[in-house]
Image: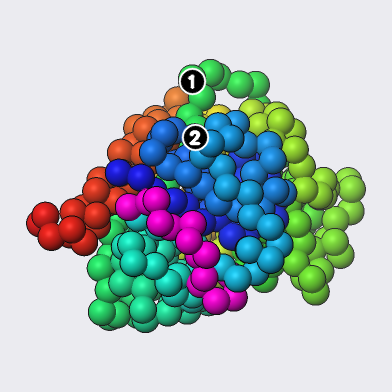
Amino acid sequence: MKILIVAAPLNEDISATPQRYGGVGRTFYLLAKNNPNITIASNWEALRDCDISVSRKIILSEEEERKIVENGDLQGWDNNFDLIFHAQPNRHYVSNKPTLVWAPGYGETINRLNTNILCHNLKNQHPYISNLMTNLYEFVLGVDIPPFQEYKKDDFILQVTNHYPQINSIILAKLCLKHNIKCIFAGPISDGYPLSDYIDNEYTFYEGVIPEERKIELLKKARFFGCLYSHPINDPPLSAKQALSYGCPILTNQIGAMAEFIDGSNGYFIRNEQDFIDAWQRRHEFNQLDCYDSVKNKYSVDNMIKTFNNVCERIINEANGNI
């Protein structure tokens, strides 16, 4: 079973936990790193720091990437593979091999020629996806889980994400400013989103796009990790799973997949200002091992590889008439 992952367009190092593009690039990297039957195709910026063998990396030129992204033209890259996996649900990649596409995210559309969709959580997918004439497959979106260790926590909240209106970073900043609680924000700020207006460098701080080492350093020390949303999401973000693996509980909304992900031992639901105050007052009650245990098995990389391989084998067998 030989799989080609087309990771385009991605313009940051995909071996780092994402701050710009959600979980797509990081997931592609982990799949390729841990499965010798996977080759990954993308641009130099995305692949240059990936510790994947050269024989399993296809560096696309700007023109080659443009043809794939704009026209779905794989230019023969697919000839030596059994399945093509990509993350552009609004595009149809032309191939005589079966294709699998990443599920559309918030506000995205899907090309109806894409017949195999990989979902992170079937139960929490947008209703319109279930109504399409497509095959929906479920797999686990996992992260690197370090060995358990208890860390000395400091009194601050961390939020690392791509900051835009649906993430509610400003709401978190306002709450922290009002109640004199330290909060560190990191990750890019979308154009026109005025988060910087609420950074006072006394209680709220902004560190920009930070290296992976700095992010892990902050996760080890943070009292909470912020994941406030204004819309339901279909799967808990990689950043939240990573935070829990470092014993850092989550502050989030009781919507979408987060409603099932947080169970009281690994985070708080924030429905209003009083919930936020209550969570902060009880910040010392969380057990780091409980946070760790909530992700260590189900959301591990090993489980992600296993569920992904099962999906690919099923699609290839169906395409070859073996099922």
Read off the magenta span: 69-82
Which residue is outermost to the left?
A: 323
> Is 195 placed above or below 4 here?
below
- Nearer-the-camera pick, 310 or 141: 310
Left or right of 126 in this view: 107: right
Say what amino acid the circle numbered 1 marks: Phe
- Seen at 43% across and 62% down, the residue is 102
Picture quadrant where residue 79 is located:
bottom left
**Nearer to us: label 1 or label 2:** 2
Mark seen at residue 33: 2
Quick one: quadrant of the N terminus?
A: top left
Left or right of 73 in this view: 262: left
- Seen at 80% across and 74% down, the residue is 192
| Residue 216 x, y percent position in the rendering | 66, 32
Disc 1/disc 2 C-alpha distance (Å): 23 Å
> Does residue 140 appear anywhere in the picture?
no
| Residue 164 x, y percent position in the rendering | 69, 67
Is-magenta flag for residue 174?
no
> Is 29 placed above or below 217 here?
below
Quick one: quadrant of the C terminus?
A: bottom left
> Is 253 placed above or below 300 here?
below
| Residue 200 x, y percent position in the rendering | 89, 53
Picture quadrant where residue 71 is located:
bottom right
> Is 90 placed above or below 151 here?
below
Mark seen at residue 148: 1
